[in-house]
Amino acid sequence: AQHWKDICNRALKLAGKKCELCEINLVTIKVGRKRIKTYQFDHIHPVALGGANSLDNVQVLCTGCHKEKTKHDMAAISEYKKKLLIEK
């Protein structure tokens, strides 16, 4: 788990604390005792499709961009699984 945390911290620093798609500033908001991040770490090539948990496969996205990318990733994963079932 620490390895992933290190990758995420490095990715955030490399991104200059900006979304790597829309370039909006990424922040952490403190609400009471909670810290709410306006960003998420994303696998450029999804792990479910063979992507690695490595710095070169991670990008930092704002919540909105991550949500949209995840829709596309889920569709690609679904197509991949269908293809696997057809080939069996």
Image (cartoon, rainbow, N blue to C red):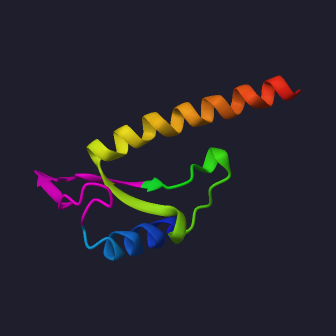
Classify the position of the C terminus by image quarter. Answer: top right
- Residue lying at 75% horizontally and 29% vertically, measured from the top left: 83
- x, y percent for residue 15: 32, 70
- x, y percent for residue 46: 57, 49
- Residue lying at 56% horizontally and 53% vertically, measured from the top left: 45
- x, y percent for residue 11: 40, 70
Task: Provide the residue span drawn in magenta.
Answer: 18-41
The answer to whether 39 appears left or right of 86 in the picture is left
The answer to whether 50 appears left or right of 76 in the picture is right
Q: Is residue 14 magenta?
A: no
So how many labels did they put on this image? 0
Outermost residue on the left side: it is: 32
Of residues 2 and 7, the one drawn nearer to the viewer in this rendering: 7
- Residue lying at 46% horizontally and 73% vertically, measured from the top left: 6
Of residues 33 and 48, the one drawn nearer to the viewer in this rendering: 48
The correct choice, above or below, for 18 with respect to 14 in the image is above
Locate residue 24: give its quadrant.
bottom left
The answer to whether 58 appears left or right of 16 in the picture is right
- Residue lying at 16% horizontally and 53% vertically, measured from the top left: 33
Q: Is residue 22 magenta?
A: yes
